[in-house]
Image: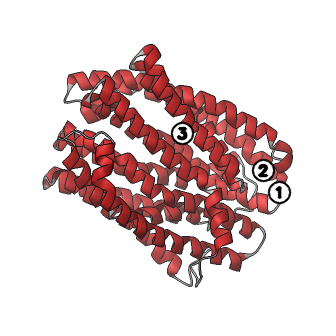
Amino acid sequence: MNIQLSDHFTYKKLFRFTLPSIVMMIFTSIYSVVDGFFVSNFVGKTPFAALNLIFPFVMILGGTGFMIGTGGTALVAKVLGENQREKANRYFSMMVLLTVILGVILSIIGFLLLPSIASLLGATPEMLPHCVLYGRIVISFTTAFMLQNVFQSFLIAAQKPKLGLAATVAAGVTNMVLDALFVGAFRWGIVGAALATGLSQCVGGVLPLIYFLRPNNSSLLRLTRTKLEVKPILQACTNGASELMSTISGSLVGIVYNLQLLHYVGENGVAAYGVLMYVQFIFIAIFIGYSIGCAPIVGYHYGAQNHAELKNMLKKSVLLMGCSGVLLSVLAFLLATPLASIFVGYDKALLALTSHAFRLFSFSFLLAGFNIFASSFFTALNNGVISAAISFLRTLIFQMASVLILPLLIGVDGIWLAITVAELCAFVISLIFLTINRKKYRYI
C-alpha cells in the first residue's frame, strides 16, 4: 500500500516513509568514508590527512545542491498541498535547470581556485599536491553531485522515496566497488579514490534525471519546459538557505578544527579528526535523512492548513530524535576504539589519540538530532529565515567559538568537546524559536 503525503502518520507509517531517506543519506555519507578508508590503509596517512583537509571546500560547492533541493522541495510540496500540480511541475523543472547552471559555474571556479584554497587551509608542502589532485578531480563532478542532492529531496515529494533509495544505493555500491578496484587493486592512489567518488555521483545524479525526463513516469512530478523565474527561485533559495548555511558553516568549522589541530597536535590531529568526521557523517545522516524524509509531509500539511497533522509530526519527531540521540551517543562511546581501528589501526599512537577523541566527541549526538530536525521543520514551513538562523548559530557561531575558546581553557580536549557545547547552545535556541512561533503555525 502506497503512503501519500496527505495521510495521517502513525509511528509505523512515518518510519516506513522516512526509512528510504535515512538509508539514502547513509549511503551518501559513505562516499568520503570509503575514500578515507582506502586512502588511509593503501596510500598512507599524509594523503589521508590531505583528503580530509580539502574535503570541506569540496562540500561547500556541492552544498548548493542541498539548498536548492530542500528549499525547492518545501516550495513544491506546499504547492502540491494547494492542489496546483502543473505549477509544482514548473517549479520542480526550474530547480533542476538552476542546479545544472550553477553546477557548471561552481565546477570551473573551484577547479581554478583549488591550489590557492589548499594553501589557505594550511596544507603542508607534503600534503599540497595530494589536496590539489584529489580536489580537482572530485570538483569536476560537482554538477552530478548537486543533482544527486536535489533529487534526494524531490523524489520524496514525488512520493517515490524507494526510487531515491535505489539510486543512492547504486551510487554507494559503485563508489565502494570502484574504490576497491582503483585504489586497492590498481593502486592508483588518491586519483583512484577521487575518480570512484565522482563516477558514483554520476550514478546518483543521472539515474533520477532520466526517470523524471520520462513523460509517463508514475510520480507526482515530472520535468517540463520551463524558464528561470526570480520569485520562486528566491523563495526556494531562502527556504533552503539553512541547508547551504549548514554545509558552508560545517565546512568552515572543519577548516578551523584542522588549523587548531595542526597547531596543537600536528598531522596526527588532522587524521584523527578525519576519522571522527567519517563516523559523524554516518550517524548524523540518520538525523538528516529523517528530517529530509518528513519535510515534504510537513510542507504538504502546512499548505493544506492541516494543523492537527503538524502537531502530530512535531510530537512524534521530537520523541524519535531524542531516543535516537541517546542510542547513537552510547554506541559511539562504546565503539570508539573498534571504529577508530578500522581507519588508523596501523598506527598505535594515532589510534590512541583517535579513540580518546571519539569518546569525548560521542556526547554531541545527544542533541544533534533535535537541532537538525528543528531547522528542517522551519524549512518545511517555508520559513527559511528561522531555519537558517538555527543552522548558522549551530554550525558556525557556537562551534567556531567553542573550538577557539575551549582549547585555551582545557587544552586539546576542548577541541573534541567543542561540538557538544555547540549542540547544547543550539538546543536552547531551537526551543526558543519553536516556542515563539507556536501560535503562528499552530503546531503545538
Instruction: Specify whether residue 193 is in view.
Output: no
Residue 395 — which label? 3
Q: Quadrant of the C terminus?
A: top right
Residue 252: percent from left, percent from top: 45, 42
Task: Name the residue: 55% across, 25% down.
Answer: 421
Mark sitting earlier along the chain (1/3) = 1
> How far from the left and from the top, in percent, is residue 118?
30, 47
Dot 3 falls on a residue whose secondary structure is helix
* Closer to us: 274 or 38: 274
Alpha-carbon span between mark 1 and mark 2: 7 Å
Q: Amino acid at mark 2?
A: Leu
Residue at x-position 43% and y-position 60%: 168
Looking at the rendered image, the disc whose residue lies closer to the viewer, 3 or 2, is 3
Three-letter amino acid code at disc 3?
A: Thr
Q: Residues within 10 Å of mark 3 (few under 14, many from 20)?
A: many
Helix, strand, or loop for circle 2? helix
**Disc 2 target residue:** 310
Q: Taking 196 as reference, is 209 left or right?
A: right
Q: Nearer the viewer, residue 426 or 321?
A: 426
| For residue 389, side relative to residue 145 (left or right) | right
Residue beneath disc 1: 306
Question: Which label number is shown at residue 96?
Answer: none
